[in-house]
Amino acid sequence: MNYTSTINKTLLVILVLASNYIYAQNQINADSLPTKVLEQVVVIGQLDKPYLPDVKDMIVYSGKKTNVINLNNGEANLPQNLGRMIFAKMPGVNLWDMDGAGTQMNIGSRGTDAHRSIEMNMRQNGYNTNSDMFGYPENHYAAPMQAISQIQLLRGSAALQFGSQFGGMMNYVMKEGDPSKVFSLESEQTVGSFNLFNSFNAVGGTKGKINYYAYYDNRHSDGWRPNGSYRYKAYYANIKFMFSKKGSISFQFSRTDTEQQIAGGLTDEQFQQNAKQSNRARNYFVPIINVPAIIFNYALSERTNLQITTNGIFGERSSVQFINTPNVNDTINTNLGTYNPRQVDRDFYKGFTTEARVLHRYQIGKVMSTLAGGFRYFNQKTQRRQKGKGTTGSDNDMSLLAPYGIDLSFHTINYAAFVENIFKLNEKFSVTPGFRYEIIGSNLTGVINNATLPVSYKGDRTFPLFGLGLQFQTTKVTQLYGNISQAYRPYLYANVTPADQIGVIDPNLKDSKGYDIDFGYRGQLYDLLSFDVNAFYLFYGDKIGKVTIKDSNNSSYQLTTNIGNSIAKGFEAYVNLSLWKAIGGGTKNVDLKIFSSLAYTKARYISGTIINNGDNISLVGNRVEGVPDWIERAGLEFRYKKISTTFQSSYVSDQFNDANNTPSSITGVVGHVPAYTLFDWAFDWKFLELYHVSAGINNLTDVLYFSRRINMYPGPGILPGDGRSFYISFGFKM
């Protein structure tokens, strides 16, 4: 049975029935009661507060560096998930443009690896979406931004409440059903360059004690480069039952299903000749991720709240590709009379997490303090099968001609407990100490190199984390804040798996540990100005890599071990100013705003060595790989009645993609990544109360650039960023 076709037809039937229902209801109302259509109320000119309150949704944010973005058409390209516009108002968020599909978000912060947000604690509605948080924490799940109401970012101090990461915790808050309607329907259709088509459709509403919201998104395109087509589908449903005034329970299900053709990497020479070229036509990437969740909320008393969240991660990440450096063409092998066999890699994820949180407010003297605590249970199994001999065909075929070279099973169990308390010393000053205790048990079994090398590894460890936050309310609308918190990143399963029979794993391999320090000043002046300026210092200890070791027989081998330490320090500054208000503009129907999101990150190694051509080379003073010193995103936003438009610039300074800071290579796999500046434009017009038209141009000046070199999938080599493209959307909400 073709389940995809069945689902699509079912959704179409639902939309048709919904439209008929709305029409019938309108006819009944028109026949029975006199009605008057009220003009839509549009709030214009308000500045969003760029940070989170002291406590929100059972989470303590007091004294911590936070960012928050409310998503709106006309301010960013939402239909294509264009990261540099969507995250523009979060200073220091580093984004890698692996392609223009928007099917994977590559986010890093403060000197951390941005590859599929591998060093971020990625969440949706408060629960994890990383594929395997402790073994392989890439985030293969990416919801459509049209379905997200708010993005929240808590920087490196997130470890106490959320666990492992150095980049911070990012949470996508999904939309909910309209509380004033039994049924509402939203639909937006987008077309654009390279045969782009995106269809986003959502239903929602409230009936009695039940609130519901669901969407279906279907996006596909041929891509900017040849062999760069993709097909992306996303599903989501949330049914929230408010069983009493004190409590509610939500049942949620999310799914993303992607099939992406991979155009491959380029050498420097190929990039300069023609950045759009591709010599890979047989490479495919297929991630399918399912995320079921249950969220239970209950008010135990007027001052005490309980939340229990349970979610799962079920899915796979599969690829079939001809893997070689880009200076080697994928052509017919004359000895075989066919193409060379491709490599098949497949991961299967099966995870379960439960987090319980209690928030209690209590009074000491005349001020109210807050205690937050909780527990976490995590159980994950991952099956990793790699280096399988695939077919010589050209389609998306994962079948094998020979067994996998690597066949491993990973299992992790994690228990954690945390507590934080906001001690209000007076109306203006608060101190927030915190503590978290982690217990991790992991094991690996299987075979490597075509079943010739058995693998067995166990890693059981426990460690505490401490933190302290300070906050001083300088005025009613401004505050000083500071925080220091320990953080860690567990070693990945790839770190404890030898790549070949001469590779050796350090039996004393340790998790990477460190700490993050913040100090800043933030606030808001009416609807004229909002700002947040801070300095930070992040110590990243015991980074993991490879060094060359010689044994007693003077034979060399590669040892995976903790290679050294790095420091990232700098500042992050965000300012949003209403120029219209500043010059005395009085009307509420017009506003002209300018924003700037600037970050300086000096990320350098302070100790350590790494292999280069078989020799151990010192890393001291080298730039941390994949981290630009400067990121600046600025924009001009204009609103007039129901029209809004944004013109944005994005500047990213140069960087290196390897810790040895190699200037260049003939294959393009390692080397310097030049600085670049891009311009984007977005527009939205609401009309006839229910309808709107959105449009935009990406990379307006058609800049030739790349933000990533890579020595693995989806390269190897330079991954060019997309050139100029456009989109236009038509939508309605009723």
Image (cartoon, rainbow, N blue to C red):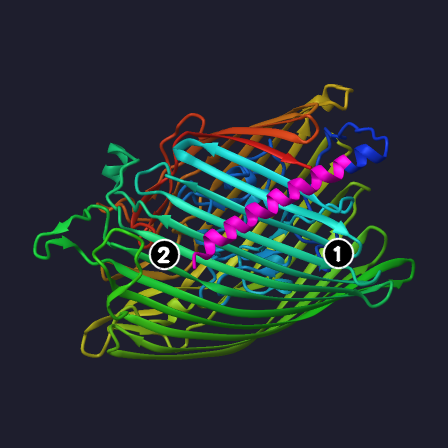
Q: Identify the image quadrant of residue 548.
A: bottom left
Q: Position of residue 136 (x, y in %)?
A: 44, 64
Q: Identify the image quadrant of residue 458.
A: bottom left
What residue did someone put label 1 on?
210
- Along the viewing direction, whichever of 317 and 44 lies nearer the viewer: 317
What residue did someone put label 2 on?
619
Q: Is residue 526 left or right of residue 197?
A: right
Q: Identify the image quadrant of residue 19.
A: top right
In the image, what residue type sits under mark 2? Leu
Mark 2 neighbour density, 10 Å: few (under 14) some (14–19) many (20 or more):
many
In the image, what residue type sits under mark 1? Ile
- Along the viewing direction, whichever of 45 and 388 lies nearer the viewer: 388
Residue 113 seen in this snapshot: no
Which residues are the magenta region? 1-27
SS at mark 2 in the image: loop
Is residue 5 located in the magenta-colored stretch of the structure? yes
Is residue 136 located in the magenta-colored stretch of the structure? no
Question: In the drawing, what numbered circle is on residue 676?
Answer: none
Q: CA distance from mark 1 to mark 2?
A: 58 Å
Q: Is residue 51 left or right of residue 515?
A: right
Q: Position of residue 112 (x, y in %)?
A: 48, 53
Vertically, is 384 above or below 606?
Answer: below
- Along the viewing direction, whichever of 589 and 390 lies nearer the viewer: 390
- Along the viewing direction, whichever of 287 and 84 lies nearer the viewer: 287
